[in-house]
Image (cartoon, rainbow, N blue to C red):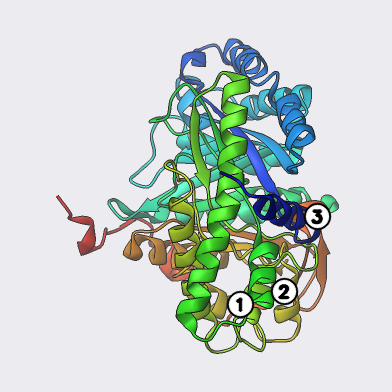
Amino acid sequence: MLETKDILETINMIDNENLDVRTITMGISLIDCIDSDIDKACDKIYDKICTYAKDLVKTGEDITREYGIPIINKRISVTPISIVAGVCQTKNPVKFAKALDRAADTLGVNFIGGYSALVEKGFAAGDYALIESIPEALSVTEKVCSSVNIGSTKAGLNMDAVRMMGHAVVDSAKLTADRNCIGAAKLVTFCNAVQDNPFMAGAFHGVGEADCVINVGVSGPGVVRAALEKADCKDITEVADLVKRTAFKITRMGQLVAKQASQRLSVPFGIVDLSLAPTPAVGDSVAHILEEMGLEICGCHGTTAALALLNDAVKKGGVMASSHVGGLSGAFIPVSEDHGMINAVKQGALDITKLEAMTAVCSVGLDMLVIPGDVTPETVSAIIADEAAIGMVNSKTTAVRVIPAIGRQAGDELNFGGLLGAGPVMPLRKGSAEKFIRLGGRLPAPLQSLKN
């Protein structure tokens, strides 16, 4: 039974510590929309999304009003479009992106994800064309997000797809250079992508999912930081226990919202994603949590260990609060969306090499990094390959979302506004991997893939 102090504590978290539900994401299967006539397929997609999600935004607003819990985003994820487009190989798949964008605009959701392809072991019908169309699709739409899974622990890495994604990222930035290269900010390259991720830009509705589900992504870096600030922890174990207890409280709130949304929309509840998702707001920072643990600045020696503790404790606390935990779950470290990370980069304490090391122990990977605009596609591919290798060998999801800042160099800044924030342009390491990337083929799966 809830006690008065628990209610008051939650109210304080919401009012003063940036606690919120980052997103309610409705996953919708488009398998039954497949049609060899691309125009008919697009009409089916638009109609199904608008029918299933017609009350999504209103439901989120009703829950916020009744419970006082901020729900920042209402989003939709769909079946990877390359699967739907497989029977329309002679047609431009950008038509599908426009249909998704039209549906998102009609419904008033923030983003729609699923302009995606799963090519970890090779290209199926529709995959190649979709990847080549990504830059155009992201330049002509406002709310569509794209992702491509280029590797897995079981399959290894599809290096031909890695090479293609380097070009896709650079071209997406170039085609939206007049809009602060926003195209690249809506594009994620995965290894070991999960099928129930509620967060953008990487959300898609997996083929193993139900016809329609509700997934919720919670947030709360500010709450964890505030808890550590108030406490007088004597050792590392006390820090871990405090983070676990705090993560439990955050997740219970997410579970409440998920169940309410599921019941009101008559859609099955999928998962709660435990990820601590920072925002540009001061105090709502994963970097500041690490500094509250005793680091002088995020990026100094000890940062990876502190982040490992945080990630583990968040998961352990969260799984006690919900029986259906999924998505990515852990701690995100997107640079442009995290005030503390931005400061660490500007102070010279954090660079791409240290961030890469940190991704070995946290959720996802290199996220929202702004890099020089003259970067070559092969260098972006090499960044993707490095990060994917970490995910492949460690049996975890890793991802790359880097934004080439066209016309800008290291030390400049690129401002996206909103939750995407603003990021300093980060320098890259010297030397070229062009010859390595151009080899192509499939990088073999590691020995640990043989688990049967």
Query: Residue shown at 66%/89% (left/top)?
Result: 296
Residue 265's x, y, as percent? Answer: 61, 20
Q: Nearest to the eye among marks 2 and 3: give it.
A: 3
| One can see residue 409 in this view | yes
Q: Are marks 1 and 3 in contact (CB under 8 Å)?
A: no
Q: Earlier in the sequence, mark 1 or mark 3?
A: 3
Give residue 403's position: percent from left, percent from top.
Answer: 68, 60
Mark 2, residue position: 340
Q: Residues within 10 Å of mark 2 (few under 14, many from 20)?
A: many
Q: Earlier in the sequence, mark 2 or mark 1?
A: 1
* Image position, residue 115 (x, y; %): 58, 35
Name the one closer to the observer, 81 or 348. 348
Identify whether 54 is placed above or below 245.
above
**What amino acid does circle 1 point to?**
Leu
State the quadrant of the N terminus: top right
The image shows residue 234, relative to residue 77, as above or below, that is: below
Q: Is 427 situated above or below 109?
A: below
Q: Quadrant of residue 417?
A: bottom right
- Mark 3 residue crowding within 10 angstroms, few (<14) / some (14–19) / many (20+): some
Residue 382 seen by the camera? no
Q: Residue at x 46, y 36 (%)?
A: 127
Q: Residue at x 57, y 26 (%)?
A: 262
Residue matched to label 3? 15
Residue flagged by tag 3: what amino acid is it?
Asp
Q: x, y percentage for residue 447?
A: 20, 63
Marks 2,1: beta carbons within 8 A: yes
Name the mark nearer the viewer: 2 or 1. 1
Compare residues 297 and 385 and report the one nearer the observer.
297
Q: Which residue is mark 1?
A: 290
The quarter holding residue 98 reads: top right
Q: Residues within 10 Å of mark 1 (few under 14, many from 20)?
A: many
